Amino acid sequence: NLDHSQPVQRIKNVCTHCSVGCSVIAEVQNGVWVGQEPAYESPINRGTHCAKGASVREIVHGERRLKHPLKLVDGEWRRLSWDQAMGEISAKLLEIRERSTPEAVFWLGSAKFTNEASYLFRKFGAYWGTNTVDHQARICHSTTVAGVANTWGYGAQTNSYNDIRNTRTMIIMGGNPAEAHPIAMQHVLAARDANRANLFVIDPRFTRTAAHATEHLRIRPGTDIPVVWGMLWHIFQNGWEDKEFIKQRVYGMEEVRAEVAKWHPQEVERVTGLPEAQLKRLAQVFATQKPSTLIWCMGATQKTVGTANVRAYSILLLATGNVGKPGTGANIFRGHTNVQGATDFGLDIATLPSYYGLDEAAWRHWCRVWETDYEWMRGRFATQKLMETPGIPSTRWFDAALLPQDQIDQPTTCKALFVMGHGGNTVTRMPEMVKALEGLDLLVVADPHPTTYAQISNRRDGTYLLPICSNFETVGSRSASNRSLQWGEKVVDPIFESRNDYDVMYDLAKRLGFADPMFKNIAVRDGGSVVVEDITREFNRGMLSTGYSGQSPERLRLHMANQEHFDLVTLKGKEGTPVAGEYYGLPWPCWGTPEMKHPGTHILYNTDLHVKEGGGTFRARFGVERNGQTLLSEGSYSKGSAIQDGYPEFTVAVLKRLGWYDELTAQEKATIERIGGQNVDRVSWSTDLSCGIIRVAMEHGCLPYGNGKARAVAWNLPDPVPVHREPIYTPRTDLLPSAAQMSELQASGG
Ligand code: SF4
């Protein structure tokens, strides 16, 4: 109960239910979270919550919180101390490592982690000596990342939830935001009502979102690609494509046109169930009433052809010139709060943080950042090959226990599973795991609540439950779907005996013998409490490829307190005029150092800029030839954009367009020729270096986006970003605190 005679503290944090990133103000009295209201000044939620957001307090004070560590002994849960639990768990882990290899232990993180916890968990996996570190994006939006990264560079939403207000035509496909992302839906409805924007909802079901549509298109399930191809057929047939945009920036559209020509409207109608006239109307409106945006969620991605769906959507945006401007782009509604951040920070079997990959250059880069000897790190892995090979995806961990031997792609020796989940409950979505979990030597579930993992009924021994703090009992940043970082402050002290993720990871690393090198740059207070801000500062130094370098804890705190503002002048495109200050967070890429005060990139691939100035170029080629077969799409992260890494033909086409091709040496051209002849869909960055592509681009002050930049840094090439990029914003220095105020704020942690 609120005591009106006592002061109430108002503490800002971020809703942890979904990826929209609404800010919440917690009202705390005498250390108890007594009330809550949405943040009125947040441009994303504008003083509103959805029903889920209104109940975040329950995550802290709910009745089902784990109170203390528990251990399963002969089918009975027994209470034990943290020291006992961590001692037994670490001894068992070391025994398994000794008996088998580091690969025998699987580490499952969570899209509900903060960025700092995601980064630390991936780093923990590296020091343990495995790449088998994963999280639930494996079965939700990993296809999105692969699909958009392969088209235009970054594996992320191009625009922003609130930028949808600038659009004139929206397609929602494979999503139901009215129920799943209700605050994002407010922006959709604002565009529909204020701009009289068209809202097409393509869905086999008549959902709550469809009920708000200006037109609901009911398709047969799983026919997304024929729908898009059918639209493109009408677009090309009637000349509605954006010819200038394609000419200037898009490569491979001719191949798409040839493919699309095979899809006659009557055939599309037969396959999709959509009347030809309706599809033609959709195509015309989307292509001509611009800016247009495509919004999707997991209805598109949780499919065997998820990556191909995403590639098709992206190509539709390219054909109609709807990229790199306000009101356009791919607005991808992710699931959990920090699914974007968890992926960026490498909770993934195939890469170190920031999509650097796993090759030697990537490891050397991170070893430099971590100030750890590369050779020592290599010795942590069973073999160097394993160090540079993707780990086993969580969808395949238990194949050995579940499938006949001849059906197993990657044999696994899974003996232990460590789940640090915050409600990440993958087992409910892969129930076949239950049988395999029963056979593990060790199962550790570190979570605020006892999840289904913890309740595998047939396990009798070797299961531990560790009570972990919710995100409201600690600090850290999170990346919403639109790549915006927001800092969450601690609302209340840890409940019961719970400890936060960071401290538990430190404790475990200490018992496993690698805390000293792992925490070399991260301070730990007496009693084992990790200084979370040091984790942010460390990844600021290493996450150069995605531009997580400019958002220090101090800046993020100022930003959350609305004390850092910018005139987002360059966002005022021709086809929509966002209001300054309407964008939130410091979305990556946020280049340079925090002192440079880059405002973050609210809209990716500014196509108002010439390619030479960093404006995007894109790759529309759909499908690759491999072993005589045409595959629908490629699935890899890490493609650059202005000059792509890999894809030699594409890159050469860009170089020729820019007039830089002749600056390659004869040997470099011969290398490109050789690679091009192999018809590969992906070559390594080192190959690109030997092609001279990066050298020439850098000599012109232009560098690839994404992984390209990462690799340049990894190979000790100079970082060009501060050199060649002009400031693209006007800082409102009058609104910034003075140096004295700033140090006062920092000293007080405010
Ligand atoms: Fe929370 Fe998402 Fe609802 Fe916003 S839309 S209040 S972030 S659950």
Image: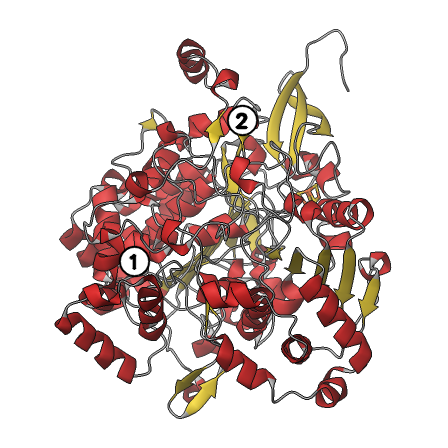
The residue at which mark 2 appears reads as: 565
x and y, in percent, of residue 662 in the image: 22, 67
Looking at this view, is 535 or 90 the one in front? 535
Q: Amino acid at mark 1?
A: Glu
The reply, left or right, for residue 441 in relation to residue 188 is left
Q: Are marks 1 and 2 in contact (CB under 8 Å)?
A: no
Tell me which label, 1 or 2, sits earlier in the chain. Answer: 1
Q: Position of residue 643 (x, y in %)?
A: 35, 61
Residue 539 appears anywhere in the view = yes
Q: Which quadrant holds residue 452? A: bottom right
Depth check, mark 1 against mark 2: the one in front is 2
Q: Secondary structure at mark 2?
A: loop
Image quarter where the N terminus lies is top right
Q: Residue furthest top?
A: 5
Quick check: 566 above or below 746? below
Q: Label 1 belongs to which residue?
A: 95
Position of 627 relative to 99 (above/below): below
Which residue is depicted at the point 25% across and 78% down? Answer: 675
The three-letter amino acid code for the residue at tag 2 is His
* Residue in view at x 62 percent, y 20 percent: 31
Q: Quadrant of residue 241?
A: bottom right
Position of residue 421 measured from the top left corner of the image (x, y, whole percent): 53, 50
Label 1 crowding class (10 Å Cα cut-off): few <14, some 14-19, many 20+? Answer: few
